[in-house]
Image (cartoon, helix red, strand yellow):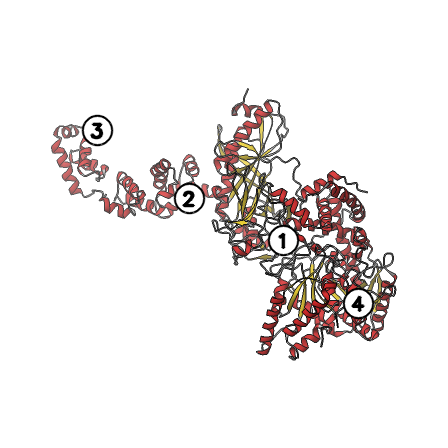
Amino acid sequence: MSIRSSATEMAEALARKEISAVELANQHYAQIEAVDKDVHAFLHLDKAGALAQAESIDKKRTAGEKLSPLAGVPLALKDVLVQKGVPTTCGSKMLEGWRPPYDATVVTKLKDAGIVILGKTNMDEFAMGSSTENSAYGPTHNPWDLTRIPGGSGGGSAAALAAFEAPLAIGTDTGGSIRQPAAVTATVGVKPTYGGVSRYGLVAFSSSLDQAGPCARTVLDTAMLHQSIAGFDPKDSTSINHAVPDVVAAAKKKDVKGLKIGIVKQLSGAGYQKGVENKFNEAVAELVKLGAEIVEVSCPNFEYALAAYYLIAPSECSSNLARFDSMRFGIRIGDDGSKGAEEVMNLTRQVGFGREVKRRIILGTYALSSGYYDAYYGSAQKVRTLIKRDFDAAFEQCDVLVSPTAPTTAFKIGEKSEDPLAMYLNDIATIPVNLAGLGGMSLPCGLAEEDNLPVGFQIMSPAMKDDRMYLVGGALEAALLSKWGKPILDFAPSLVGSK
Amino acid sequence: MSAISREEVANLARLARIEMSDAELDHLSGEMQVILGAVARVQEVASADVPPTSHPIPVNNVVREDVVIPSLSPTDALSGAPASSEQRFKVPQILGEAE
Amino acid sequence: MSLNYDQAIQKYEPTLGLEVHVELNTKSKMFCGCATEFGAEPNTQTCPVCLGLPGALPVVNQTAIESSILIGLALNCSIAPFSRFARKNYFYPDMPKNFQTSQYDEPICVNGYLDVEIETDEGNKVFRIDIERVHMEEDTGKSLHVGGSTGRIHGAEYSLLDYNRAGIPLVEIVTKIVPNTGKYAPQVARAYVAALRDILRGLKVSDVKMEQGSLRCDVNLSLAPSGSGELGTRSETKNVNSLRSVETAVSGEILRQANRLQSGEKIVQETRHFLEESGQTRPGRSKEQAEDYRYFPEPDLVPVVPDNKWIEELRKSLPEKPADRRKRLQSEWSVPEKEMTAMVNAELLDTVEETVKLGADPTKARSWWLGEISRIANERDVVATELISVTAVAQIINLINQGELTDKLARQVVDGVIAGEGTPAEVISKRGLKVVSDDGALMKAIEDAIAAQPDTAERVRSGNIPAAGALIGAVMKATGGQADAAKVRELLLKHLGQ
């Protein structure tokens, strides 16, 4: 067992007492020490907290107490979730130094499961972006090629997994922020059905789209983490009050015989890198070999998904980010006694927010304005209905839908940062799922021939049927592993300092 | 194509309480124009007979019982405050009146 | 040339609108479980939700929904089958999220009415006030302005914020425009708020103390030339903290606007601030551009869809309407209209009813509370029930009826109780205020009086009844006022053959 093992393998080693949680945590801290100066996945390391948790798990295990399956396994937490007493920045200058006085429900669940939270990972500021270049603390670098982006907004979590700095991670996904980073780093990431995981303590970007989700290097690991964090939370009014489907069993089942898999016509073609499409098609062929049936479906309203998203998300965020006004928490700029509250607010928000955040706040303010509401926000909400209908119709014909996760592989840092629209296009395949509130998974399906960079395969499942993603994902992963002979991350150029 | 003037952006910045230089306003107004041009297409399909979706998963009536649960201690409540005094959040002078 | 009120109201027709905010008396806040106690130490009743900390989420208080529906039902509203929360976006430091979670185009109750009765020159008149909507929202924190010359907001050096109040449930009740009140606009406005307060008190959903802020009133007023049928520009007056202020604010605004219009100036649509001390209004902060609240449906909360069965249960649980209760009591007590109104205006109806429930007869209960006790209360500028309890009053009335006390003695007992000398029984004992009703003792005193005034006695014997007064007076004096004067008269006259 090493830091390259899966979380499941680590959990088994811990259970067999071959290694202690403290040792395992320290091994990961050593790896972080070795590579994170290049990768920059982490914004903050909570060694004291992590080791205390690890020690407590070791004691309990020695005492023979019954522990959760992932107890003692380390995890990287996206810095958008509040963790009591631990710096939580959301990748923004606005929250520099802020230590929340409470834990997110997800964090409470992780702690209760005995999972060891190593630290907080880097992200696009307030979850807005597709490359982690919008972080106020510098970008994260893709472990496959340090000159390239790791995806966003959750690039830090995905990079931490790909660089073996942690076997588990938590991300959040509003328009693809878990799935797209997973795709470009050859890791696995899932956005659960909306409401499947509590949003209490998840700093809101776009409330009707945000979801926290599990990330790991294998489908089974992801399923186990999913099981640990999902479930009804009375503190979140939008939380689903139903049992979590058995995603772990589904991940283990690996049987897709007779399953109908729909390929969405609109999520291909122009804008999609050839190598990405090729790898996608090869993966589909694998599923056919396993006995799945392919159905071509058309979701014509998906053409409008990106436009609707870039109205809804900025609108909600313009309201969600209003609370950052320097009065109760966060930085305060310009309070020299000569300025009133409003001026101090204006200055603080000017300095505290980065360009992309300001851009979206202004866009959202406009879309909600009197006189423009119907044409923009109002219309976008209608498109949402149409997209939902397209999904409903598609799911009449098939059990899951599939597509490439992202249109391209990892681009160079700086390549798209001056062109907002070009950046937004990275989300073109992931967004429809958020708008409809469904489940979406990305898992690696190969390396694009043009650049040898990872390609992600997206699986979409109907609301509250997240287990289907794991069923198909587990089967595909096994088939591909068999085809490649070794895990895809073993194909990555080695990072300086990593084993 | 929606033209959005610098004055309009300045008004939006005021509504959003973000101080912006003229240069920033100009730059943003250009960007807004491009982005709005791209997103305006939602109007093409948003006909009157299509209802809007505010909540992806249709659930109603989520409520909680009227019981008191412990609050944060004042120390915790004020822990993030840039300034405080007399167990209250201290803020620069507020001009104008509340709604 | 300055118009006076009568002139103003001749030339111009007022149109009223009233917005009332009610602070509900739920135990916990609207969207979180923090306590709602009044007067707690600052920031001891806050949590991530009501502080608007990043990541916090609201969950609706079920009782608040119930109270809102009860209010709507009591105001004859329709309860919306589908209702939703919306965000009202604007920045102000006392509002932690810089948006208020409120309701916009889908309020919980719509289209009700409230009938109010006022005294006019042509007798009592009923005005129907149509209610546009009743909706739920949350209260803001409280700011304290420190430094500066006046300590009020302008010129303050800094502000201190306490968020204990932030998130307490508020219900907003908005009337449709109220036309055709003419010169009675101020009284109608006052009567509306008073009637509303009574209903809310009866529903037990709020303390409705205007002085404490659990009932707040905003007054909208516009004027148009009489008979024009037009609508003028309205002003909104806030900070109206008592019934009297409601009346004053309306008449004041009528006067102010009339005089402006008279001198050819336009009315500015603005928010004005009512000043208790002067009864005047002054302009609030000038908004060069009206604030755009950018309302949109609250994504963190799901719709409220009250089920019909529940609404009907709530409807059945409604207490008797104040107006109906008054009619019932009036009939039960056989009290004339005018006296009923007097009790209501003196806000002593509940008190009288409670006294009656303890066994006192309605007439005496009314006459004591509205007579002697109110007189003393007004002298001391306190509320009548602060002076003496209904229990004490009921006991005193009972003693009168039993013949243990005369009215005169009873007055002394009331004084004694008010002075804090104890219960009626204790006062009677301490002061020795027993009615001398023993015929023997009385007869002795009567004989003594006759012996002392033989001429007067002779006059009474020969038919001059009024002359008995002097003898009765002497007996009263001899018994220290503790004889029952009527009994003395009876015995004396009988003794003197009359």
Q: Chain of mark 3?
A: C
Residue A227 spot, x, y in % from top left: 67, 68
Discs 1 and 4 lie in a common subunit: no
Alpha carbon distance from label 4 to label 3: 118 Å
On the rendered image, what quadrant is the N terminus of chain A found in?
bottom right
Residue bearing the label numbered 1: C305
Q: Amino acid at mark 4?
A: Pro
Q: Amino acid at mark 2?
A: Asp
Res C104 seen here: no
Q: Are marks 1 and 4 in contact (CB under 8 Å)?
A: no
| In the image: residue C228, left or right of residue C384 | right
Alpha carbon distance from label 2 to label 1: 36 Å
Q: Nearer the viewer, mark 2 or mark 3?
A: 2
Residue bearing the label numbered 2: C350
| In the image: residue A161, left or right of residue C261 | right
Discs 4 and 2 lie in a common subunit: no
Discs 4 and 3 lie in a common subunit: no
Q: Return the disc, 1 or 3, that comes first in the chain's sequence.
A: 1
Seen from this angle, which residue lies furthest top?
Answer: C1
Res C345 seen here: yes
Q: Amino acid at mark 3?
A: Pro
Residue bearing the label numbered 4: A444
Q: Residues within 10 Å of mark 1 (few under 14, many from 20)?
A: some
Residue C466 circle label: 3
Picture layout, residue A83 above or below residue A381: below
Alpha carbon distance from label 4 to label 2: 76 Å
